[in-house]
Image: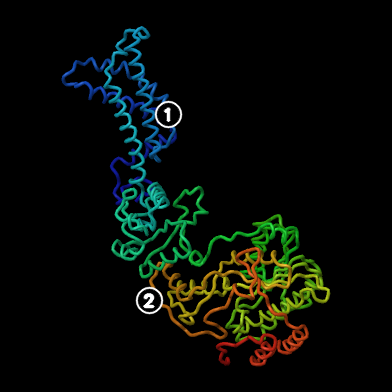
Amino acid sequence: MDETKPQLNGGRRLPGSRLFARVMDLAGRHRLLASLVVHNAVFALALLLAFLIRFDVAGESPGWLRLYLLWLPFFLVVKTIIFGQLKLLRSSWQYAGIRDLVNILIASWVFLMIVYVIYLLFTYMPTLFYRSPLFSFSRGVPLLDFLATVFLISTARLGVRLYREELRPVSSEGLRRVLIVGAGNTAEALLREIFRMREDRYRVIGLVDDDPHKTGTLIHSIPVLGTTDDIKRICEENKVEEVLIAVPSATQKQLRAIIEKCQGAKLRIQSLPGMDALIDGRVTVSQIRSVEIKDLLGREAIKLDTEDIAHFIADRAVLITGAGGSIGSEMCRQVCVFKPARLILLEQAENGLFDIGNELRRSFPAIPVAEVICDIVDRDRVTSVFKIHRPDVVIHAAAHKHVPLMELNPCEAVKNNIFGTKNVADACCATGVKEFVMISTDKAVNPSSIMGCTKRVAEIYTQSLNGSNGCITNFKAVRFGNVLGSAGSVVPTFERQIRQGGPITITHPDMTRYFMTIPEASQLVLQAAATGQGGQIFLLDMGEPVKIVDLARDMITLSGLRVGEDIDIVFTGCRPGEKLFEELRTAGEDMEPTVHPKVKVWKHRKVEWDKIQEALAEFSRLATCTDRDRIVAALQLLVPEYAPMNPPKPQA
């Protein structure tokens, strides 16, 4: 089947469609000439119909024909001028609408008024005119001509639009049966865009809206079938394949509620972007995109104090550790927006470093980028890098973050998270770095894991350096929870399990976590860093916690699959070091506000320097120790609130 030729929506070819398509193509190449010809033909036909109706041709003498031929040139010339002035000769018939109809009415009224003014002048001031049959007309003919002109021009334009919209080639992918959520202005605009597509892709079954008063109404002949509570029933009854959410103002909670109502139906779910992403409120089919899990977990756009961040970053040399990781690479992108003097990327993994370095050179060619392969555990190498590059700002993102793996390899967490951070912090003091920002975790709050506790120790050490022993560096730490899409996080794990056909594995039905998108977390880290004066631990507002099992169900639904039928959910038990929920309290007596509503400061207790040195000496003796109990005991000396949870079984 040739998809370039017009067809009926059912797939049958319209008789004469090939000839019509050729005519339309020719008219498109000579648009103004074609418009003049067609309009004048319609004008002539309208006047002819007016005479035929006014004069009963069966009973009248043929004198009306001579009068018609006398009037015709005047009608054609004057109407062409009027329609031209209102730009009706240049408007596209394919997109004919209410505005075109209004302009046709105005043009026809103007012409009618001109004719009747001439008639009145002829009647009451006959000396102004020659005694010619041209001015001896019936008053009914112009009125009939007005009606015929409006009817014929409007019908012709709407006919072309109807042909384009209803007699289109069917997409090679076939027609998808679609239900639209929302019955407001956006849904109406979306329907118009769907009908104007060059290929017929969607068969819109109906709409649903939370306003029950809209049920039963029609929008462009498409019925509103019910409310969002009826989505599943409507989809099953009408064999709907796809749901389009046309509610750009929907909040995250409203969007999540819609997705939950689709659970159990095998649907592809798509949406329009938020209202801020729609230019002037205009809707196009190209803006339709799949709903992603970040749409359900994300929050309103962050408003940053860009002036403070620019002052913190602009024209400074910035070094980012762990630059090739999920957080580190996004930090690089966000920092480049504020035009640092140069950017030093420090990373142990060469592939990640290679990728982010190339990306930054493409996206920010004006910013000098230096790529440095370095393991932060190597103290001499770290010191050498700092002496060579002399950074002004250091953002420390490098760390071991995988909780169960660090439970099985505790000495590696001690080496990387504690001594790696110590090496970077000491190098900052030695080389006069002005700002140090450590990216920490909510797992450092009353830690239950080796990973969380070692990050807490790193916080304690860096905070103790602030303002001590002549060090001029401002040390800050920023805590936040899980980030969507980061390497090893739950979302990419679930995506992989869904692609493999399941099952999705979850440790516990009550497991709850905070989530934030990587860009949002990175932006707030910069905001916190630009806010503080040093010696502070910042906590980011992570919003409401999310149950992991709900997250899994939503991801299965968004994949067009059904929980329990296409993909199973299996509970495997809590892993070593895991809590059922993380603590990230941002309110209370020990919390202070900052200039940004999503950033708070924790009033942490100071730890004696001698105690820190004693603990570090013990950690150094355990850096290669395989005795987990000794490492746990050493950590509890400095972090007494550390309570190990679900210790791992000894490995074979």
Dot 2 alpha-carbon crowd within 10 angstroms: few under 14, some 14 to 19, many 20 or more: few
> Which marked residue is nearer to the observer: mark 1 or mark 2?
2
Which element type, helix, strand or loop, lies under badge 1? helix
Residue shown at the point (54%, 71%) measured from the top left:
515
The amino acid pointed to by label 1 is Leu
The amino acid pointed to by label 2 is Gly
Could you say where residue 83 lies in the image, as x and y percent from the top left?
41, 28
Write down the quadrant of residue 376 in the picture: bottom right
What residue would you read off at disc 2?
Answer: 564
Mark earlier in primary sequence (1, 2): 1
Residue shown at the point (70%, 82%) measured from the top left:
415
Residue shown at the point (71%, 89%) measured from the top left:
622
Which element type, helix, strand or loop, lies under badge 2? loop
* Whether residue 30 is visible: no
Residue shown at the point (66%, 60%) measured from the top left:
360
Could you say where residue 117 lies in the image, as x and y percent from the top left?
36, 18
* Whether residue 407 is visible: yes
What residue would you read off at disc 1?
Answer: 33
Q: Tags 1 and 2 in contact by the CB under 8 Å rule?
A: no
- From the viewer's perspective, tell me whether residue 625 is left or right of residue 574: right
Image quadrant occupied by the C terminus: bottom right
- Residue lying furthest right in this view? 470
In the rendered view, how is the structure colored?
Answer: rainbow
Write down the quadrant of residue 427 in the picture: bottom right
